[in-house]
Image (cartoon, coloured by chain):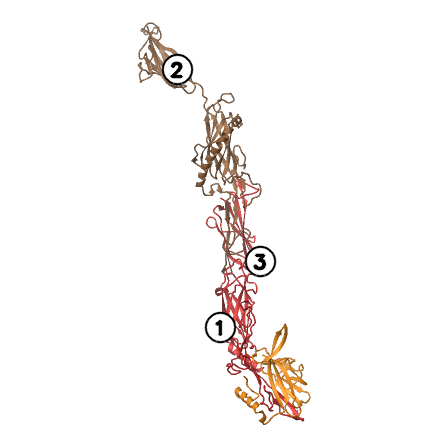
Chain colours: A brown, B red, C orange
């Protein structure tokens, strides 16, 4: 399901990719001008020469002698400046960390639901990282689709509008951290079966170091260390979907179905609450007052709009004024702003009770009284 | 014979005031001395012995002792001197003649036949082609005798020269040599020109008043007198030999530990941030050199690294001694001595930041 | 110049020259005259290098330095009209000089040497001197004090002979 979409989208993605990567790189270039120091929290920059030498002072008898400096091969010529530094180049440590930030509660059919990750370059060289999402993970209840990654900021600097396609690269200097939003579509059902609350879909983001700062491919040095060249060593830990020391790191986030949407339904019942005859009995004789109760019951979720209850005066009866109660609150008979109930104003010889929008699941009760002619 | 003995006594008496002068028999007959020769002939005529007749330079026929005339010449002044050196003195770089008595010794012999005054000049000549001259000492001074020095014929004066020894360098190393030239010059003499005279030019023979021809007879010395035959100069060189430590300081580094994700890596290790680098600083003193004293190793580890633990110094693979580490990454060893043939190893472990 | 100690021991040199000149110019009238005329000449012998070969030449003994060689030639001429016999020429080795070995020569002569101031003579190689230790050692040429030549035969009237020796100036 996923791969099909990807194939279809590929031409468009590539077409946009170059322009967006360019924008991203421009932004990073500005950042790099600010970060001029070569020593980072993650260590001395790869390729830095670390050099020093020893100074030896001594005497012969009581005569202080000219100092001698060291050299890598041994120096015997006294005098400052005659030694040579012992130098090594700091090797390239490739290390990265992907962290998932927040999960998303979704409903079936949600479009472009968002989860967030961060990617930190923990190495000591600028790296180009490949970012790939994978929703087809086996242990979850459903798969998301149309996932789009967006880098929203790099080390706290917002990068508005830089949207990465599903598979893309981002260049981070040592110590830089990218915040990545991934938005995916939630299917309306799971392979035709209605979803239940608590159903989940896992999404992984895998970052892979691909290029070094000098443009060479990121590959680990297998030969023994050479002090005068920059060797490459993978030092990353294993994430959710990668291995130890493989120049990759990953994390997973989760979409969880929290609300099942059911269409609200409304039911209405009308019943006689009481009959009071003029003799104090309860027979239906002329002059007897019959009080009706109209019950509105709603179920489901959401709201029910424009709920208007009309009750035309039954035959052989007449309305007893000022008897309309909504949820035990007396209503006026006039069509006024005090309430949304009236008798005869909206529709002649008819009680009209306008409930407007009511939340699904609420219940309302209307009472009113008629007199038998 | 008698006269010779007397002269020796005389020279001792006159010259005893000068220290370190070896009084010897004068070389040659003193200038101004008249040398006489007379032959005497005896004969008989007709068996009768006749009165002997003495000779004269022009011929004498008058018999009898005292009637001849000696054939005579006056000994001229021979100016000749000899400087010997070829001694060696062991010195240490940085020593000064004034403070450390860096003495070189020479002798100066008056090989002429008259008492003369001499001046002496010591130089460490820049380009002496008379032997190994690895470096030049400076400020060479003749410290004995006081100059000018008066030396009787045949006498020998010991000369002392002191120079300043330069600090050690690529050329001033253990065993390096510096030739120092001593030039002696006879003062106040001019070689005779013009006609020779048989007798005194003026004055009386056999007295100091007799002025004779002056002949320079010195040979060619080494060093500054090279090529200077018969110039009233002579020179020789002595040699300073540097006797110092011959230290070699070597500093190597290697990754000693690399931990990734909490696990120490056992295979190839690299210089990545967090890796432990072991610096090995080896100071060795060549066998046969002088002992170096008060050696202090100081190493400022770059601030891109962090020193781990306490650096140590071990001499000849002996037990390691902690090194006082100064503030932050400044490592300074306690002073120690290093004999010839010994090796000290300073070990510093630091992590790459 | 010189002290003419054979002329008058105490005479001054200038007087000596004058006296000699007078003597020479007034030879004919001088009262006592021997049968022989004795002349002593000196020359400096200089070793020179000539075409890579060491040779020597004689120059006037004007500039003489210690170590140099002087040759003395003594000529004796019979100026009488009678033959002279039993001729002995005695020459002290000059002060400040050393006899050069084998340098004594002279036609028809035999030379002997003395190491004791002329009291005793012997052939070269037969003389002995007493060392500081009291022992006797063969004499060296430098020990010689005198040379004596004996002319073998008679020197005929109006004939001339010569002897020579060399010394090195100390």
Q: Tell us which disc is closer to us: 3 or 1.
A: 1
Q: Are marks 1 and 2 on the same chain?
A: no
- Residue C136 visible, this orientation: no
Horizontally, residue A330 falls left or right of residue B112, namely left
Circle number at residue B257: none
Q: Is residue A20 above or below residue C67?
A: above
Q: Position of residue A352 (x, y in %)?
A: 35, 13
Q: Chain of mark 1?
A: B
Query: Do the CB atoms of the residues marked 1 and 2 lie less than 8 Å apart?
Result: no
- Residue B323 visible, this orientation: yes
Q: Element type at marker 1? A: loop
Q: Position of residue A372 (x, y in %)?
A: 33, 6
Q: CA distance from mark 1 to mark 2?
A: 143 Å
- List the single residue furthest toward the right: C153
Q: CA distance from mark 3 to mark 2?
A: 113 Å
Q: Element type at marker 3? A: loop
Measuring 52% from the left and 36% from the top, which residue is drawn there? A209
Q: Element type at marker 2? A: strand
> Which residue is denoted by mark 3 in the rendering?
B287
Q: Chain of mark 2?
A: A
């Amino acid at each position: 399901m996923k791969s099909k979409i990807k194939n279809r989208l590929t031409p468009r993605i590539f077409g946009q990719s170059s322009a967006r990567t360019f924008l991203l790189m421009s932004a990073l270039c500005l950042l790099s001008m600010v970060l001029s120091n070569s020593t980072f929290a993650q260590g001395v920059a790869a390729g830095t020469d670390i050099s020093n030498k020893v100074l030896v002072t001594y005497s012969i008898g009581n005569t202080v002698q000219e100092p001698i400096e060291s050299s890598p091969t041994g120096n015997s010529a006294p005098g400052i400046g005659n030694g040579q530094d012992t130098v090594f180049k700091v090797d390239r440590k490739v290390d990265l960390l992907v962290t998932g930030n927040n999960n998303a509660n979704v409903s079936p059919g949600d479009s472009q639901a968002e989860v967030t990750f961060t990617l930190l370059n923990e190495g000591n060289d600028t790296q180009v990282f490949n970012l790939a999402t994978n929703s087809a993970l086996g242990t979850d209840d459903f798969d998301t689709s149309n996932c789009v990654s967006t880098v929203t900021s790099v080390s706290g600097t917002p990068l508005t509008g830089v949207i990465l396609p599903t598979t893309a690269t981002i260049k981070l200097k040592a110590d830089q951290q990218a915040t990545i939003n991934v938005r995916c579509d939630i299917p309306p059902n799971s392979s035709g079966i209605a979803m239940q609350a608590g159903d989940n879909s896992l999404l992984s983001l895998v970052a892979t170091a691909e290029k070094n700062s000098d443009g060479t491919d990121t590959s680990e040095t297998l030969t023994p260390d050479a002090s005068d060249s920059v060797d490459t060593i993978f030092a990353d830990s294993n994430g959710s979907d990668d291995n130890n020391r493989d120049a990759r790191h990953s994390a997973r986030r989760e979409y969880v179905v929290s609300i099942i949407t059911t269409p609200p339904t409304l039911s209405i019942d009308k019943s006689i609450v009481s009959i009071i005859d003029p003799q104090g009995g309860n027979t239906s004789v002329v002059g007897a007052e019959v009080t009706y109760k109209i019950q509105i019951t709603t179920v489901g979720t959401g709201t029910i709009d424009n709920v208007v209850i009309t009750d035309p005066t039954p035959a052989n009866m007449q309305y007893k004024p000022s008897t309309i109660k909504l949820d035990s609150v007396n209503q006026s008979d006039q069509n006024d702003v005090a309430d949304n109930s009236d008798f005869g104003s909206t529709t002649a010889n008819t009680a009209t009770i306008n409930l407007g929008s009511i939340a699904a699941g609420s219940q309302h009760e209307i009472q009113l009284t008629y007199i038998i002619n | 014979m008698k006269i010779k003995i007397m002269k020796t006594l005389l020279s001792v008496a006159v010259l005893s005031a000068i220290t370190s002068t070896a009084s010897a028999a004068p070389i040659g007959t003193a200038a101004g001395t008249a040398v006489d020769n007379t032959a005497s002939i005896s004969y008989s005529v007709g068996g009768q012995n006749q009165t002997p007749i003495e000779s004269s330079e022009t011929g004498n026929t008058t018999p009898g002792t005292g009637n001849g005339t000696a054939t005579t010449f006056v000994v001229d002044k021979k100016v000749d001197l000899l400087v010997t050196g070829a001694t060696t003195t062991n010195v240490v770089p940085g020593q000064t003649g004034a403070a450390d008595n860096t003495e070189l010794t020479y002798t100066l012999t008056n090989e002429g036949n008259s008492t003369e005054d001499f001046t002496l000049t010591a130089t460490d000549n820049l380009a002496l082609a008379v032997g190994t001259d690895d470096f030049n000492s400076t400020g060479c001074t003749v410290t004995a005798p006081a100059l000018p020095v008066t030396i009787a014929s045949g006498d020998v004066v010991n000369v002392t020269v002191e120079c300043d020894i330069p600090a050690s360098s690529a050329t001033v190393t253990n065993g390096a040599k510096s030739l120092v030239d001593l030039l002696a010059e006879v003062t106040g003499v001019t070689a005779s020109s013009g006609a020779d005279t048989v007798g005194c030019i003026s004055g009386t023979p056999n007295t100091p008043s007799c002025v004779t021809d002056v002949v320079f007879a010195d040979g060619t010395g080494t060093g500054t007198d090279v090529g200077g035959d018969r110039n009233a100069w002579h020179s020789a060189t002595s040699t300073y030999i540097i006797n110092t430590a011959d230290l070699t300081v070597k500093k190597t580094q290697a990754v000693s530990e690399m931990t990734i994700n909490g696990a120490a890596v056992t295979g190839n290790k690299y210089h990545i941030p967090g890796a432990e680098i072991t610096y090995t600083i080896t100071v060795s003193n060549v066998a046969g050199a002088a002992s170096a004293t008060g050696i202090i190793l100081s190493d400022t580890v770059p601030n891109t690294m962090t020193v781990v633990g306490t650096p140590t110094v071990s001499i000849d693979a002996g037990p390691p001694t902690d090194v006082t580490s100064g503030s932050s990454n400044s490592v300074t060893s306690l002073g120690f001595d290093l004999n010839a043939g010994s090796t000290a190893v300073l070990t510093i472990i630091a992590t790459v930041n | 110049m010189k002290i003419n100690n054979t002329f008058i021991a105490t005479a001054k040199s200038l007087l000596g020259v004058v006296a000699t000149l007078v003597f020479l110019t007034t030879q004919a009238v001088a009262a006592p005259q021997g049968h022989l005329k004795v002349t002593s000449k000196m020359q400096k012998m200089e070793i020179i290098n000539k075409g890579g070969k060491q040779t020597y030449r004689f120059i006037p003994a004007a500039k003489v330095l210690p170590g140099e060689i002087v040759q003395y030639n003594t000529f004796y001429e019979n100026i009488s009209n009678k033959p002279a016999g039993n001729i002995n020429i005695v020459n002290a080795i000059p002060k400040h000089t050393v006899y050069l070995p084998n340098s004594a020569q002279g036609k028809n002569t035999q030379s002997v040497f003395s190491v004791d101031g002329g009291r005793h003579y012997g052939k070269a190689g037969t003389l002995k001197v007493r060392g500081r230790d009291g022992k006797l050692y063969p004499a060296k040429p430098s020990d010689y004090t005198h040379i004596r030549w004996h002319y073998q035969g008679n020197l005929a009237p109006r004939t001339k002979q010569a002897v020579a020796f060399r010394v090195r100036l100390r």
